[in-house]
Amino acid sequence: MQPYEERLTAPRSWWVIAVMAGVAMALILLPLGTLPMLGGLIGGSALSAMAVSSYGSARIRVVGGALVAGDAKIPVTALGVPEVLDAEEARAWRTHKADTRAFMLLRGYVPTAVRIEVTDPADPTPYVYLSTRYPERLAAAVEAVRA
C-alpha cells in the first residue's frame, strides 16, 4: 500500500488558455479558408493541451522505501527530517534562499511545499524541494517510511 501519492495537475484555467490558443491559431489561419482554420483550431488546441498535460503530469510518491518525485528516486534513508513550508516560506525557498545544487520539483501554481535535507555525504544535493498541495501528509508519509 502506498502511503502517499500526488499528481501536480495544472489549474483548470490553463486548460481554458490551451483552448484559446487553438482559437487564436484558427483565427490566424482564417484567411486561408475553412479547412485550414479548422486544422488550426484542432492542431493548436491539441498541441497546447499536450503541453499543459505534460507540465501537469509531475507526480510525487512515497513507495517502497523511496521518495519518487518526477524522474528522481531517492531512498528515504538518504533524507533528513522533512520541513513543511507554508506559502510565504515556500516562496522564499524558491527565490532568494534557493541553492542551485538543490533538486526542485516546483510548480508555481502550488503555493505550499516540503523541503527535505539530503543526508547522504556522497550526494552534492543539499536538499529536495517539492511543491505539494498536502505538505503535512507528505512529511508524515516520509517520516512513516523512515521509522
Image: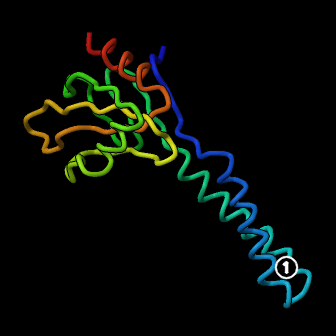
How many residues crowd mark 1 within 10 Å: few (<14), some (14–19), many (20+)?
A: many
Tell me residue 125's x, y (percent): 18, 43
Looking at the image, is 24 positioned above or below residue 132? below
Residue pushed farthest left? 121
Up-down relation of residue 110 to residue 27 (above or below): above
Query: In the figure, residue 115 lies in which quadrant?
Result: top left
Q: Residue at x 20, y 49 (%)?
A: 99
* Residue identifier under label 1: 37
Which color scheme is applied?
rainbow
Note whether 24 is above or below 103 in the view shown. below
Residue shown at 13% from the left, 45% from the top: 124
Q: Is residue 108 left or right of residue 92?
A: right
Position of 123 with respect to 55 (left or right) is: left
Give the amino acid at mark 1: Met
Q: Secondary structure at mark 1?
A: helix
Question: For the C terminus, which image quadrant?
Answer: top left
Q: x%, y% of residue 136?
A: 41, 20
Question: What residue do we see at 56% from left, 53% from top?
Answer: 54
Image quarter of residue 146:
top left
Q: Position of residue 67 (x, y in %)?
A: 34, 29
Return the residue found at the far right: 34
> In the image, is residue 127 above or below residue 108?
above
Would residue 11 be found to the left or right of residue 142 on screen? right
Q: Residue at x 7, y 35 (%)?
A: 121
Nearer to us in this view, 131 or 57: 131
User: Please, which residue is most extreme toward the top here?
Assistant: 147
- The one nearer the camera, 5 or 99, is 99
Q: Residue furthest front?
A: 88
